[in-house]
Image (cartoon, rainbow, N blue to C red):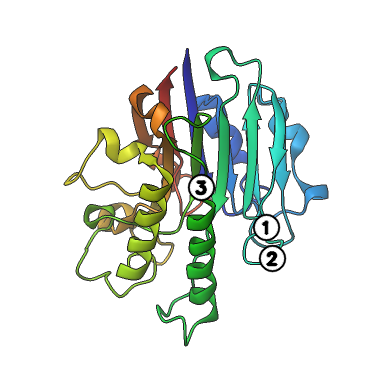
Amino acid sequence: MKLSVSTWNINSVRLRIDQVRRFLQEQRPDILCLQETKCPDDKFPLKELQACGYPFVVHMGQKGYNGVAILSRYPFSQTSIMEMCGRADARHITVTLTQAKAASGLVIHNFYVPAGGDIPDPELNEKFRHKLQFMEELRGWGGRAKPTATPAILVGDLNVAPLEHDVWSHKQLLDVVSHTPIETAALEELRQEGGWADAMRHIRPEPEKIYSWWSYRSPDWAAANKGRRLDHIWLSQNLAGTIRSVEVTRETRGWERPSDHAPVTAVLEL
């Protein structure tokens, strides 16, 4: 069976509900993981999203910031949430699929890693210190993605562009939060020690430049194309051979009132 999984930092699910519906109608992924829903649980647009053909939804949110959700065509039997750094920040949610043929038992982790502010110094910037602590806790968790473990997918806005060609200018962004050496090393250590395969780079290796985020500050984001690959899909090693495609739906960045992130979708052959 083919399984398509999308991840998208939507930057307010209520503000951009029309964009989410349009993406679901046009792309029809089996599973959509959202980050930065910025929505308390009692305000989440559950019925509107279920009406798009996704009856199985789990979400965790808070007013004004953070928030994660998973929409699925397939039922899931288990859900769990991790609180990182001693904070109930609505940055993680997990489901285990059931009744999905070859995908039954597959675990999907959805993460929203802290952005880290503007100053890449943990002594001067508490937000950056929090980001590094969050990533260190993730490294300790690891995800149990070893070859003999349960098949798993980790997706989300990880807020790090780890490789040279994941940013528009490696040299100019070395001291910019999201591409500093301390962040890129931390993310790669997390990925490698956890046994995760970077789905995008598994089939589209460097030096191809790939971006999923373009700043709102750019007056003409498309022409400038000064992007970063902040949104990721990782696979446990026992799924690495199933990857068939990974694409960024770049055109969503040009929709009316867009998120600054574009969806990333992986298609697996299970």
Task: Identify which residue is drawn at 67% across, 26% down.
Answer: 54
Question: Residue 217 location in percent, x, y?
Answer: 41, 67
Which class describes the residues within 10 Å of circle 1: few (<14), some (14-19), or many (20+)? Answer: few
Mark 3 or mark 2, which has the lower sequence index? Answer: 2
Q: Amino acid at mark 3?
A: Glu
Which class describes the residues within 10 Å of circle 3: few (<14), some (14-19), or many (20+)? Answer: few
Label 3, on which residue?
Answer: 256
The span from disc 1 to disc 2 (Cα, nearest Å) is 6 Å
Label 1, on which residue?
Answer: 83
The span from disc 3 to disc 2 (Cα, nearest Å) is 34 Å
Instruction: Say the numbered circle drawn on residue 182.
Output: none
C-beta proximity under 8 Å, tags 1 and 2: yes
Is residue 25 toward the left or the right of residue 76 in the image? Answer: left
Task: Identify which residue is drawn at 65% across, 15% down.
Answer: 99
Is residue 109 toward the left or the right of residue 265 in the image? Answer: right
Label 3 element class: loop
Question: Residue 246 location in percent, x, y?
Answer: 36, 32
Which class describes the residues within 10 Å of circle 2: few (<14), some (14-19), or many (20+)? Answer: few
Q: Amino acid at mark 2?
A: Arg
Instruction: Say the numbered circle drawn on residue 87.
Output: 2
Q: Quadrant of the C terminus?
A: top left
Label 1 element class: loop
Task: Identify which residue is drawn at 60% across, 34% down.
Answer: 21
Question: Residue 255 location in percent, x, y?
Answer: 47, 44
